[in-house]
Structures are given as structure tokens and as C-alpha cells.
Image (cartoon, rainbow, N blue to C red):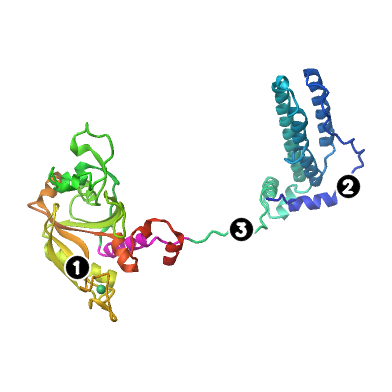
Amino acid sequence: MKKQIPHGLKSIRNDKVKKFRKAPVAYSVPKLKDFSAASLDKAADKLRSALETEAEAIDTWDQWVAFRDRWVARKNGIVTQVRETWLKNAPPSAKAGVGKAFNATKKLVEDTVDGKRQSVMRWAEERELGPPEASKRGFSTAKEAVRAIYQFERLDITLPGIPRPLGAEHPVIKTMNEIVSVFRNLGYSVQEGPVIETDYYNFEALNFPLNHPARDTQDTLFIANQESKPVRDRLLLRTHTSPVQIRTMEKLKPPIRIVIPGKVHRNDPPDASHSPMFHQIEGLAVDTNITFGDLKGTLDHAMKALFGSSVKTSFRPSFFPFTEPSAEMMVTCFICGGSGKRGSEPCRPCKQTGWIEILGCGMVDPNVFEFVKDNGYDPRKVSGFAFGMGADRVALLKYGVDDIQLFFQGDVRFLRQFA
Ligand SMILES: [Zn+2]
């Protein structure tokens, strides 16, 4: 960035009465006759005294800028010339000594240039921006005024800024937020948990028997080298957000109503409808006397809030280890309105059936409550329902995207369409 002359200093320069000074004889870097210590000392002395004389003569900002450029400009400044003519030409045997002398000279020049800059600034403070003058300019103290000048020097505030394009919510996050807000309005609170889980929370406490195929490495991504640990302590990337149900029930006594949005992993090769990483939202409600009717009513309301009041819901029996009974819920296709057709074309998202399978749900299995019985979840006293859906899948359907990979490739051209 081009250095600007601070505004205040420009007027100082103009107002100042310049004293006549004898122009110093311009110093130029001599070639060294030999590279002995004595010869080096002599040359360094000459340079030092030239530096001092020139520094001495500086009164104004402009003079300081010229001084700085003459001595430390990267291209052909005196320091650069010293390196080129002394250091580079030194024979190997003298390299170390010349190097040392060069470094000392370089530091001296830089310190002098910087010191001079500070004294020019101080001068400005005393002459131009004494306390009365500073306050006239809107600064409460002279110190503050000088600080402002320093900033002027570093930063040209008249340059246009670098425009930073405003980002937009990622379609998956947007979808998750919409789902969360529907349940928030029903009095649910949001809970989160770790993505790296133990077998205990991911499987055992959710009533997965020890030989359940989900534990297979073909389905689940395990952290390596844990064979020496007991199975329940082994770490894995959680395959669903359900462990947070257990973690929350360990923490909070019933009644609870929670939604759990989060990232989950499965050992699935990526294709148009699978990704090894995806997002789920699940919910859990536990209280006394919660029935399957509550589950149906809640989810029917949620789907209408999400997809429009005209969607209908339908349940069909299913199986999950942690719910009993379990169901899959379908909603009427919100793309074709349940007709299975879009004009004369078949509706692909619902495969012309007019229904879309949207989530899994069920009544919490009493075996799950047994794991958190001590915190008030006695299966003889409480009941509850749970449900879970893939946020990415909902986003795919909602936005008519045909490949889940597009969500995670970070292609701005794709993501920009949702802004
Ligand atoms: Zn359809």
C-alpha cells in the first residue's frame, strides 16, 4: 500500500520555516579493496558517519521519506548496495566476517530510519498538535491525535475497501434450522452431543444386541487400534444422533422434549443418494402417559408446518432396535401434490406413488429406559416417542436437487443458488 503523508503533517511542512543547511556530500557505497577486518571497519565507519549526517539533516516528513527510500529501499537502497558490493563479492574465507558486519550495518540503518520517523512524529505532536490544537481537531489529547496520524501513515483510508461477498445459509443448515424451529414452537429444546462416540452410547444403550450387523465395520466407521478396549468403550463416528437421547436422559429428569440436529457418519461409498457424512434431526418426548396418538399428532403437525397444510401423513410398521412399536412415516408428495404426476410427466421424487417416505419413529423401547432408570426413567412410570429424519434428504426433496454430493463439494456456483 502506498504510504500517504498524514494530513496534519502536510500543513506542518508548508508552514515550517526551513533553516538553511549545507547539503551533505552524498554518500555512495565504495568497493572494498580487500576484505580484511581493518578494511571492513573503515568502510563501516564511513557509512555510519554518512548515515548520522543525513539523519541529522531531516526536518520534515518528505525529507524522512526520501531518507528512508535512499537507505532501505529494497531495490537499490544503500543497504541493498552493501549486500551486493560487499557481501556478494567476499571470498569464501571472509564471508562470515563480512556477513556479521553487514548484519550490524543493516540493523543500524533500520534503527536510525525508524528512530528518525518517531522523532518527526514527536515533532508534529509538539508543534502542530499541542493539546489545544488537538482538541480543535476532535481529538481529546495530543497523544490520541498522534495515534491517529500513525494510523494514517499505515493505512490509506481513502482506498476503496475489499468487497467481501455476503455468504448464505447452506441449504442443509437452512433445512435443519427450519425443522428445529417447528419443534421449538412446540416447546422442544435443542440438544447436541459429540460426533466421536463410544459403542455404549451409539449402540448398547440404544438396545442394539452385541451381534447387531450395524456394528460391522462395513456400516460403521470405527477409530483405529482399539481392540484392547472392552467393546462398549470403543470409539466410533456416531452413526445416528440417537446417542444424544441417552446423554440427555442421563442429564435431565423427565419430562423432556428435545430435538437433536447433528452430523453423522456411515461407511457408505459416496453416490447420488449416499454420503459417508450426512445430517440427522431427531426428537424425543418423554413424560407420563405419552401415547402413539401423541406421536402421530405431533409429527402430522410438524409436516404440515414444514411442507404446507395440505400434506397428509401415513404410518406403516417398521423396526428399530430402540423403539417398540416402530413406524415409518410417509407424507403426500409435496412436489406433485400426491398425484404422482407433474403435468403429463411422471413425478420422480415420489416414484409416481404420490407418497414420500420421510422419517422413522416409534415409542421408546422400555429396554432403553432401563439404561437411564436411575435418573427417573422407570419404564413402568414413563413413556415416550422418538423420531428421526435425514436433513440432507429433506433438503434434496425440498430444493429438487438430484445428487447429495452437491451439498458437500463446496462449489460456490451451486451454493449461490440458495442465497
Ligand atoms: Zn410426487
Gap in angstroms between the C-alphas marked 1 and 2: 88 Å
Q: In this view, does 400 lie to the left or right of 329?
A: right
* SS at badge 2: loop
Q: Is the magenta stretch mostly helix, strand or loop?
A: helix
- According to the image, label 1 marks what residue? 330
Q: In this view, does 264 lie to the left or right of 6?
A: left
**Disc nearer the start of the sequence (1/2):** 2
The residue depicted at 28 percent of the width and 81 percent of the height is 344
Where is 25 relative to 283, above or below? Answer: above
- According to the image, label 3 marks what residue? 161
Provide residue 40's location: percent of width, then percent of height: 79, 22
Where is 18 relative to 274, above or below? Answer: above
**Disc nearer the start of the sequence (2/3):** 2
Q: For the residues carrying marks 1 and 3, which lies nearer the camera in this image?
A: 1
Q: For the residues carrying marks 2 and 3, which lies nearer the camera in this image?
A: 3
Please name the amino acid that badge 3 sits on.
Gly
Please name the amino acid that badge 1 sits on.
Met
The residue depicted at 72 percent of the width and 27 percent of the height is 104
**Disc nearer the start of the sequence (1/3):** 3
- According to the image, label 2 marks what residue? 17
Provide residue 201's location: percent of width, then percent of height: 21, 44
Callout 1: CB less than 8 Å from ligand 1 = no
Residue bounds of the magenta highlight: 167-186
